[in-house]
């Protein structure tokens, strides 16, 4: 199930936690879109033998693009690639960028899924994160999306934030459940070095949240969303039955995908490619007919580790039959030594020939998965 990701590298401001590549001015938007058109044409053969089942516009903030610009982009994609008639087509939007007219326009040009970055309903937390919208705008944006006819809406929230109390997080979840979106992505705050939070942490001006409170946030998240009918199908993702993100599931299932735009990544099954993380270099090279990317070929050990890393993030887990078919018996013997140790501790489970991380331990999944890697 192949997919296409397009990175729109523009934001009106940089949130304090975000380390995705972006520019805070749209002065070069026209030139960027011209370069993106060229890249689409250059990459026409990357997924030539596959039907495209998902398209995802992320960023940055794709909702800074005008409707005519989005329509031209989607038209070029349909002309260049073989899009499935029922392809999932997602666009990320900010609550303060949209109106009912804009949302209805998105529907008309083919988008059938929205991903909305809300992060919090608490005014103090929104200011701390340096978000542009307030709680009322966020709630209204969800209602407008539903009014516009979007029946597949995903909203993003963050927990594990310094200063976020258990009570405020519970209130946030209650308000979220009342809005009843089909999909919820909830991420524990990570403090990355090249962000404002990272700089504050290095200066001793910001401390990460207490581990015990962080765990309480996670348990509340699972309990309240589970009681409201959401399935916890991946570490950071919950959905109503049948509303899993097809695009992100493609990443976790090692499907092929093409990434377009600065900093975007691609995968053809054996190699990974990534575009330069610089808008001006990207535009300059594309205009010369040069793909501005680097690549690496994955070794058998890399493919084994990536299979574990992506599949153990999900409720489905790792299929033993797949491991037996694609990897050597020596590798599997080494794996099972560690698996058996973690089974006895209750951190892993083995059912129906699937190895899974027990959901209550997903919050520490990174360390568990790294224990299983082949070095």
Image (cartoon, rainbow, N blue to C red):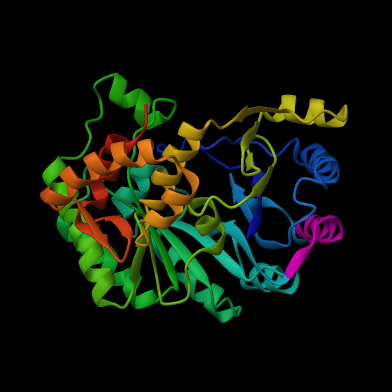
- Image quadrant in which the C terminus is located: top left
Q: Residue furthest front?
A: 329
Depth check: give the residue in front, 36 or 253.
253
Count of numbered circles in the view: 0
The answer to whether residue 293 is above or below residue 134 is above
x, y percent for residue 183: 44, 68
At horizontal 28% and vertical 70% (from top left) the residue drawn is: 225
**Where on the picture, by quarter, is residue 163?**
top left
- Image quadrant in which the N terminus is located: bottom right
x, y percent for residue 316: 37, 62
Most common secondary structure along the magenta stretch? helix
Depth check: give the residue in front, 208 or 84.
84
Specify whether residue 116 is painted magenta: no
Give the residues drawn in magenta, as a range. Answer: 68-84
The answer to whether residue 41 is above or below residue 71 is above
At horizontal 47% and vertical 67% (from top left) the residue drawn is: 244
């Amino acid at each position: 199930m192949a997919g296409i990701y397009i990175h729109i590298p523009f934001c009106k401001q940089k949130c304090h936690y975000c380390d995705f590549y972006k520019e805070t001015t749209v002065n070069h938007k026209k030139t960027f879109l011209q370069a993106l058109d060229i890249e689409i044409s250059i990459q026409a053969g990357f997924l030539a033998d596959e039907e495209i089942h998902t398209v995802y516009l992320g960023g940055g903030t794709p909702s800074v693009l005008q409707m005519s610009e989005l329509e031209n982009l989607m038209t070029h994609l349909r002309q260049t690639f073989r899009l499935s008639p029922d392809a999932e087509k997602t666009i990320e939007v900010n609550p303060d960028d949209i109106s009912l007219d804009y949302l209805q326009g998105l529907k008309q040009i083919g988008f059938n899924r929205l991903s909305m970055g809300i992060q919090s309903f608490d005014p103090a937390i929104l200011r701390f994160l340096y978000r542009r919208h307030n709680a009322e705008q966020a709630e209204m944006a969800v209602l407008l999306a539903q009014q516009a006819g979007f029946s597949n809406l995903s909203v993003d929230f963050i927990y594990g934030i310094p200063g976020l109390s258990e009570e405020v997080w519970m209130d946030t979840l209650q308000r979220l459940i009342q809005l009843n979106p089909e999909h919820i992505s909830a991420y524990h705050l990570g403090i990355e070095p090249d962000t404002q939070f990272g700089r504050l942490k290095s200066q001793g001006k910001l401390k990460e949240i207490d581990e015990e409170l962080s765990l309480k946030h996670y348990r509340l998240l699972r309990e309240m969303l589970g009681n409201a009918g959401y399935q916890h199908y991946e570490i950071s993702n919950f959905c109503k039955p049948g509303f899993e993100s097809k695009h992100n599931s493609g990443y976790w299932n090692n499907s092929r995908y093409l990434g377009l735009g600065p900093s975007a990544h691609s995968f053809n099954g054996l190699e990974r490619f990534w575009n330069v993380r610089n808008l001006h270099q990207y535009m300059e090279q594309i205009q010369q007919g040069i793909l501005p990317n680097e690549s690496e070929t994955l070794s058998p050990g890399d493919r084994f580790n990536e299979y574990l890393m992506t599949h153990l993030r999900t409720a489905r887990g790792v299929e033993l039959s797949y491991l037996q078919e694609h990897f050597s018996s020596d590798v599997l013997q080494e794996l099972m030594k560690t698996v058996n140790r973690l089974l006895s501790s209750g951190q892993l489970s083995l059912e129906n020939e699937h190895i899974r991380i027990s959901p209550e331990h997903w919050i520490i999944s990174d360390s568990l998965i790294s224990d299983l890697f082949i070095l």
